[in-house]
């Protein structure tokens, strides 16, 4: 499968033969509809002074703010990587952040630690889906030799044993015979059965804990799928001691026959479920095949900063400005000065103050912060971002504002004072998301507490 690469919001390095048809390019409509990629017109920025009056305009495909393996058309996919070195798996676990799964299998590397809850949810969903293809191929069966004493023999009659054990005792109506019996109770099938049973129990537990109707509907549908698989595996005898985990097929040490190729994927997922193995979203060189998981890193970074500030600050209230209750108005009532004609009274639209983070104490706003998933390139945050947070500060009577950014490797981390706009001090905080982002968030929490004293 050809895979092209790109960084978030960067150009996709397509080859000349990619996406070529006579009248243009054909791509998956769901990928375009959801805005994972987009076509843009690009003009060279380094045109010489003597460039002709008309210049070439090129159409290029750009990734948007979603990372993961994205199918484009046919077997062609693009692997979109984070713009900044980041511990994406850790942030997802902290925020319990949802991922979007596409119908494309991607390999992930397993981690030595135990799986997080969201990882187990993904493993269960993909495992149950993989069983549908496996059952359509048919179960692997083994022929095992059995020896039986009966009056209705089949297979091979064991003459010597019959004389010794039957004829010598005067029994002339029974013989010892052996035959090969086809059975479904094999270690690989026992592993599948155990994983399905565990998955159903987990889904039952989830149903008892949640109240959201849409989530309950989705879990019930997945549980019904597990019940259907249990019915298909009903002739397999279970192994409570899980001795099947040492089987070479289950451990991946022996390749399954090509006619039963679906076992490779399903057995690896079954073993991962039963051993609660975790996986990492950063590394694509592993052997654990899962649906391609897509993440919006802009939203993930914002939620991670907000949650960690709540965890690591004391005597402060960290609010999500996007969901304030009651709503705080941006525009205030105003009287029209005498003698001034008003052509039209404009609608105020949503008329809300919606900063990413509000830090308050006793109902007083001490700090307004906006989280921007973009590095600081010229010393200051983007002009639009500065104007936005200063407007919020003016409306909320707050003396300090802050923009929060990921830190690129060559930049110093920590708190930076941009300057003062009127009575408002403008700060920025740069945090490294690689290696141990929690350590950086503890330092940021300490800096925020100092500003709010």
Image (cartoon, helix red, strand yellow):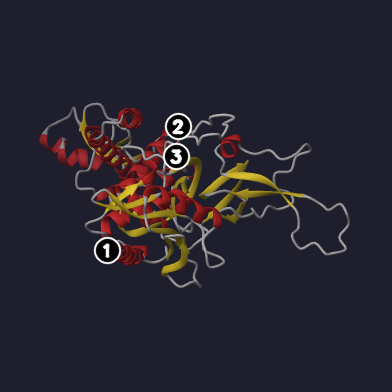
Mark 3 or mark 1: which comes first in sequence?
Answer: 3
What residue is drawn where x is 51% and y is 34%? 338
Q: Position of residue 80 (x, y in %)?
A: 55, 53
Question: What is the distance, in whole Å, between disc 2 and disc 1 at their CAs?
Answer: 66 Å
Q: Nearer the viewer, mark 2 or mark 3?
A: 3
Left of 405 or right of it: where is 159? Answer: left
**Residue 384 percent coordinates (x, y):** 54, 53
Which residue is situated farthest in the front direction here? 339
Between 50 and 145, the residue placed more toward the observer is 50
Q: Residues within 10 Å of mark 3 (few under 14, many from 20)?
A: few
- The residue identified by callout 3 is 331
Q: Earlier in the sequence, mark 2 or mark 3?
A: 2
Query: Is 65 or 311 nearer to us in this picture?
Result: 311
Residue ID at (29%, 63%): 449
How many numbered markers are drawn?
3
Residue 227 in the image, given as x and y percentages of width and height: 30, 29
Q: CA distance from mark 2 to mark 3?
A: 62 Å
Residue 347 at x, y percent in the picture? 51, 31
On-image quarter of the C terminus: bottom left
Q: Which residue is farthest left?
A: 169
Identified at 37% across, 45% down, the residue is: 321
Q: Which residue is mark 1?
A: 453
Q: Nearer the viewer, residue 422 or 153?
A: 422
- Pick the front one: 144 or 60: 60
Q: Which mark is residue 136?
A: 2
């Amino acid at each position: 499968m050809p895979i092209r690469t790109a960084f978030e919001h960067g150009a996709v390095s397509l080859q000349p033969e990619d996406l070529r048809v006579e009248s243009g390019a054909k791509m998956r409509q769901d990928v375009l509809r959801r805005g994972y990629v987009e076509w843009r017109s690009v003009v060279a920025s380094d045109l010489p002074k003597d460039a002709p009056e008309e210049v070439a305009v090129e159409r290029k495909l750009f990734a948007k703010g979603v990372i993961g393996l994205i199918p484009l058309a046919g077997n062609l996919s693009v692997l979109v990587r984070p713009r900044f070195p980041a511990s994406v798996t850790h942030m997802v676990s902290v925020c319990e952040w949802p991922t979007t799964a596409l119908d494309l299998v991607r390999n992930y590397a397993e981690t030595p630690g135990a799986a997080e809850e969201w990882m187990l949810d993904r493993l269960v969903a993909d495992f149950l889906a993989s069983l549908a293809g496996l059952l359509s191929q048919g179960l692997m069966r083994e022929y095992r030799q059995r020896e039986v004493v009966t009056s209705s023999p089949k297979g091979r009659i064991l003459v010597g044993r019959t004389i010794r054990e039957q004829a010598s005792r005067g029994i002339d109506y029974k013989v010892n015979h052996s035959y090969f019996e086809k059975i479904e109770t094999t270690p690989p099938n026992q592993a599948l059965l155990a994983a399905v049973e565990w998955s159903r129990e987990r889904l039952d537990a989830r149903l008892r804990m949640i109240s959201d109707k849409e989530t309950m509907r989705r879990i019930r549908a997945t549980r019904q799928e597990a019940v259907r698989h249990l019915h298909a595996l009903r002739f397999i005898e279970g192994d409570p001691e899980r001795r099947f985990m040492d089987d070479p097929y289950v451990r991946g040490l022996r390749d399954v026959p090509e006619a039963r190729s679906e076992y490779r994927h399903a057995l690896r997922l079954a073993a991962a479920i039963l051993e609660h193995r975790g996986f990492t979203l950063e590394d694509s060189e592993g052997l654990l095949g899962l649906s391609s998981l897509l993440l919006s890193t802009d939203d993930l970074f914002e939620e991670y900063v907000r949650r960690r500030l709540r965890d690591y600050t004391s005597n402060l209230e960290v609010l999500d400005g996007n969901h304030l209750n009651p709503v705080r108005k941006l525009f205030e009532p105003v009287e029209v000065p005498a003698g001034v004609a008003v052509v039209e009274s404009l609608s105020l639209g949503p008329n809300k103050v919606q900063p990413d983070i509000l830090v308050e104490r006793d109902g007083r706003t001490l700090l307004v912060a906006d989280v921007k998933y973009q590095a600081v390139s010229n010393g200051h945050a983007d002009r639009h971002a500065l104007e936005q947070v200063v407007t919020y500060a003016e409306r909320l009577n707050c003396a300090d504002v802050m923009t929060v950014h990921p830190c690129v490797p060559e930049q110093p981390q920590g708190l930076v004072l941009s300057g003062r706009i009127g009575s408002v001090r403008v700060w920025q905080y740069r945090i490294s998301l690689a290696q141990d982002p929690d350590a950086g968030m503890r330092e940021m929490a300490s800096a925020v507490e100092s500003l709010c004293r």
